[in-house]
Amino acid sequence: MNIKKSIMNCRLLTLALIAAIVIGSPAQLRAQTESQNVHPDGGIDAALLEKLRDSYKGDATDKALKNALSGTSISKLAVNSENAAMMDTHFSDRVRTKGITDQKSSGRCWLFTGLNVLRAKMIDKYDLPSFEFSQNYIFFYDQLEKCNLFLQGIIDTRGLSDDDRKVDWLFSNPLSDGGQFTGVSNLVTKYGLVPSDAMPETFCSSNTSAMSSLLKLKLREDGLRLRSAKGSMKQLLAMKEAMLTEIYRFLTLCLGEPPVSFKWTRCNSKAEIVSVKEYTPKSFYEEFVGEDLENNYIMVMNDPCREYGKVYEIDFDRHVYDGHNWLYVNLPVERIKEMAIASIKDNTAMYFSCDVAKFMDRSKGTLDLANFDYESLSGFTFGMDKSERVRTHASGSSHAMTLIAVDIDAESGKPVKWMVENSWGPASGYKGNLIMTDEWFNEYMFRLVVEKKYVPADILKMFDSDPVLLPAWDPMFSPEN
């Protein structure tokens, strides 16, 4: 045993000597970093700062760029003049739509997009001259339901500590005017629909920040009261009801009172009166939409960070407490395009979301990787792929729009470009729309909601498996605005 121990000690000593030679002693490492002007503790010392200063040459090119950047935005200077021509606006296949909506200064893109999908169908089916559902009507109930979702979530987590991740997430996100398609399907199914003139927009619906700030402040206060209450569940629910009563009054003051019935005159595209009838929101929805929104659609995602072919569910990510969590299947982008093309060819628009701000030329209304040359301007190289951008929080879905057109190359049969109907008003972009190249689609589209009849059987079968549950605070799943 002693001999073996001696041999082992010799081996360890030999390894230590080798390490000292190759790696160096702590003193040698310190001397080495100091000789390279690198602060041994990882900071920027005077020597390193001097080295950085010396590295800037300030030549004629740098001086010209410095002068330009002192008074002009980076995006304007980075515009790629070689891509200045307007993109071709011809599309081989396009959904029949009329009119452009405007969400104004609000985060309701998800709501406008979902309702725009439904209104395109209604206009086409009933030969309407134009039409718009009341976004304000659904938004009223969205805000009421989200307030209840938060307050009930606080009650449900009252046994957890204040620093529990879920409790902290609830108080960090008590309310939002953003959302996604599950909110549209749950809210419309529960509350029905009304035309825009039955509950028109108000200043607060079009400019949501002040109203939302007050509601979030009140919800956080009410949440603390519920967490500190010692009563029974019955007493806690009574407290919550009193809180919702105050919230309902405030929402009515800001958004108006939702109608329980209304009269609507339907005209055709020739301005001829077809019918005059009394409706409730539910009867209007059943007569003019009449489809099962909660079961007739699926959401697909292209997130290269997660395994394809799997179904995922986002915990507590819903608009209605007794509604459905956000559920989607993750797929390669080419599979998503197959369904999108089938839907467009059948004159059916889709809910589509993406990272809209990336390489967007607002003046032309185009989304094109060649719109801006940031590398030449900055001297940087930007080499991350889609997966790396998502993993490092550099990209994610930020805005929802209505996918209405695709241009397919006659020879290759492949899509060249796509068009979405936006909700930023008719003066924005290209006649209220945005046109994207197929390359941009690959890099910055994330979600699509499509009717099941356009979904291949093998993808539908994926929903038979148990979903992978993801936490509500996953950064990939912030509400679309």
Image (cartoon, rainbow, N blue to C red):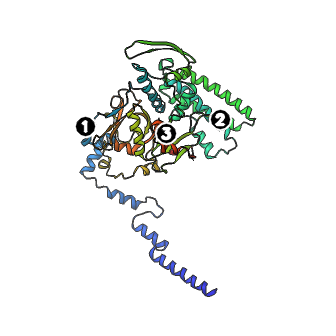
Q: Could you tell me which residue is drawn at 38 percent across and 24 percent down?
A: 99
Q: Quadrant of the N terminus?
A: bottom right
Let me know if residue 451 appears in the view.
no
Amino acid type, residue under disc 1 in the picture: Ala
Q: Could you tell me which residue is drawn at 36 percent across and 26 percent down?
A: 426
Between disc 1 and disc 2, whose residue precedes?
1
Between disc 2 and disc 3, whose residue precedes?
2
Q: Position of residue 156 (x, y in %)?
A: 67, 39
Q: Nearer the viewer, residue 176 or 280?
A: 280
Write down the residue under mark 1: 85
Q: Nearer the viewer, residue 260 or 412?
A: 412
Name above or below for residue 382 compared with residue 113: below
The reply to whether callout 1 and callout 2 are in contact (CB within 8 Å) is no
In the displayed structure, does residue 75 sit left or right of residue 330? left
Write down the residue under mark 3: 299
Q: Position of residue 305 (x, y in %)?
A: 47, 51
Q: CA distance from mark 2 to mark 3?
A: 26 Å
Q: Could you tell me which residue is drawn at 67 percent across and 30 percent down?
A: 240
Q: Position of residue 172 (x, y in %)?
A: 57, 40
Disc number placed over residue 152 in the picture, else none = 2
Q: Secondary structure at mark 3?
A: strand
